[in-house]
Amino acid sequence: MRYERKRVLVVGMARSGIAAAQLLLSHGATPLLNDAKPLYTFGDALKSLTDTACEFHLGEDPVALLKPCDLVVISPGVPIDAPVVKTAKEKGIPLIGELELAASLLQGEMLAVTGTNGKTTTVTLLGKIFENAGRVTHVAGNIGYPLSSVALTSKKRDVIVTEVSSFQLETIKTFRPVVAALLNITEDHLNRHGSMEQYTRLKQRIFENQTAQDVAVLNMDDPALVRMAEKLKPRVAFFSRTQRVENGACVEAGKIVWRWNGETRPICDADQVLIPGPHNLENALAATAMAAVRDVPAAVIRHTLQSFAGVEHRIEKVRVLEGVTYYNDSKGTNVDSTIKAVLSMKGPTVMILGGYDKHTDFSPLCEEIVASGMIAQAVLIGETAAQIADSLLAAGFARITMADGMEDAVHMARRLAVSGGNVLLSPACASFDMFRDFEHRGQVFKDIVRALP
């Protein structure tokens, strides 16, 4: 679609909405900016869009703005059943998400990663691999840097590594990565998607427009993903840390190997992967497969796996105080992600849990907390505190303390922690009850911890 002289309603003016408006302006469109919040709440965030062709309609009903529009672009935070979405479809007005807009306009070779957990670590690691291989590389998407911002500057020979969420996949039409990975699927976002079946269907859409010339990367240790592979058009590369694969990346005799087209290439010893934990070994295998299938040399992959230290807010070591190590895992926004953090702990750990309610069953986490034997105390905060407490008690864990906000929780955790142990923030919940996003939550935690006398 050509955007010149088109009137485009952009709904949702967070980072992706702002970037979409900038991209549309660069292609000669007139963006109509809309958000439920009024202008004064944005501060300087929209400064780059003032004195442009943009029309500001903040705090207005977006349905009333549809009549003069040629297209609607929604941000990931706008639900697919929102009135503006339903009305646009009824009126026959084309509607896409910011991801689809950007993908239709950017230049370069796009690789994409989705899954319930591990996306940010995998795309950041994969981006570093391509960067170390000498390629101009952009890491974007759900990671916090909109793909539309990349589309403003990318060139034909660039590599674009994109983190993709289920929210973004709701509104794709032509989105087609040359390599796409689905890392895992566990319960998450059921408050938006309604069922695991729908959530799984959305995740699978990352492969929807791929052809036989493209590659799908899937976790062989997840039976649901193995079954999914049988129905895909692209060629499949598996990854596994527990079993041998014929085409893909796996661990054999303690070594990561890449096997493709009948050839086998050793990468490095599995215990040389710098980022800790079995879940990060899986992330490393996925990144290895995605890079190797695009002919990145084994030596480059090896160096990156041995030197990549991880991402902010994911089991991030913040400080050691009085013999206690403080970890920020604010990226632990669902049960499965927090289970992985629990399994990474060594020594008695005081855990801070709780946040925004996504209609999650906390029972598997609470059972793992008991089984691991590493969690000495649970300090609970946020909307879900009482629900998590009930699940912990049902699992036989009674060492529970309620806290009034993050600062209170950190001070309580300090009093409860013992030398040689840990304090772990891994909420198993979204942050929206108390914070802007998980980055804000993690930064507040780190600021409090670093200020402890």
Image (cartoon, rainbow, N blue to C red):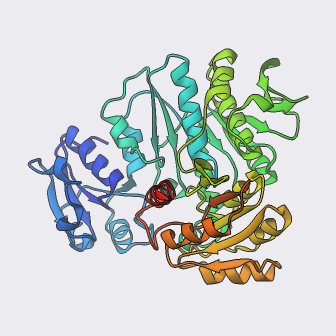
Residue displayed at 51% across by 53% down: 169
Q: Is residue 280 visible?
A: yes
Residue 99, given in percent of the width and then of the height, sits at 42, 47
105 over 41 or under it: above or below: above
Viewer-proximal residue among 210 and 183 = 183
Task: Classify residue 413 as left or right of residue 252.
Answer: left
In the picture, residue 328 is in which quadrant? bottom right
Viewer-proximal residue among 45 and 307 = 307
Residue displayed at 72% across by 34% down: 285
> Can you name the residue that lies furthest to the right here?
253
Task: Classify residue 367 as left or right of residue 168.
Answer: right
Number of numbered discs overlaid on the protein picture = 0
236 over 396 or under it: above or below: above
Task: Classify residue 76 as left or right of residue 20.
Answer: right
Viewer-proximal residue among 374 and 253 = 374
Residue displayed at 29% across by 59% down: 13
